[in-house]
Image (tube, rainbow, N blue to C red):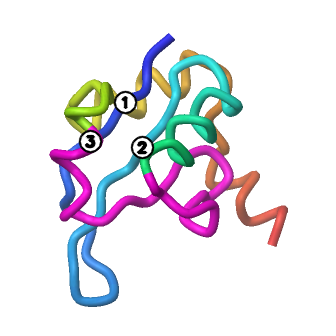
Amino acid sequence: MAILIDDPRWPAHGRLWAHLVSDADLDELHAFAAANGIPRRGFDRDHYDVPDHAHARLIAAGAQHVDGHELVRRLIASGLRVTAKERRAGR
């Protein structure tokens, strides 16, 4: 099991954002986020959006840095990925 983080490259609210995911378990992801000061409101169905200023701190805390393609590949493999179709149906 691993917590993964990609590069902060998604612009919103005047800053760049990264994605934080688990490759195995949402409970593991929530526990890691809570232990590292990431608010639950940052959770979006299968990942946390995390601001660029938290990136290095989360890696130091144990998140594995991967590129965006690897993050998505491992999230899909875990069975935790919420597809765009599922997102549209849920809103």
In this rendered view, identify the residue nearer to me: 18 or 30. Answer: 30
- Percent from the top left, x then y, of residue 48? 50, 53
Inter-mark Cα distance, 2 to 3: 7 Å
The relative height of residue 22 versus residue 12 in the rendered view (above or below) is above
The residue stretch that appears in magenta: 37-58
Which residue appears at 27% of the width and 25% of the height?
A: 64
Looking at the image, residue 58 sits to the left or right of residue 87; the answer is left
Is 53 magenta? The answer is yes
CB contact under 8 Å: marks 1 and 2:
yes
Identified at 75% across, 52% down, the residue is 86
Q: Is mark 2 on a helix, strand or loop?
A: strand
Residue 19 horizontal/vertical position (percent): 38, 50
Judge left or right: residue 8 versus residue 32.
left
- Tag 3 secondary structure: loop
52 magenta-colored: yes
Give the x, y percent position of residue 58. 29, 41
Q: Residue furthest right?
A: 90
- Residue on which the image places disc 2: 20
- The Cα–Cα distance between marks 1 and 2, rounded to whole angstroms, is 6 Å
Q: Which of marks 1 and 2 is nearer the N terminus?
A: 1
Task: Give the mark nearer the N terminus: 2 vs 3.
Answer: 3
Report the amino acid beneath label 1: Leu
| Residue 65, horizontal then vertical, whole percent | 21, 30
Count of numbered badges drawn on the protein:
3
- The numbered mark at residue 4 is 1
Tag 3 and tag 1, C-beta contact below 8 Å: yes
Residue at the disc numbered 3? 6
Determine the residue located farthest toward the top in the rendered image: 1
- Circle 3 crowding by C-alpha within 10 Å: few under 14, some 14–19, many from 20: many
Name the kind of residue labelled 3 in the image: Asp
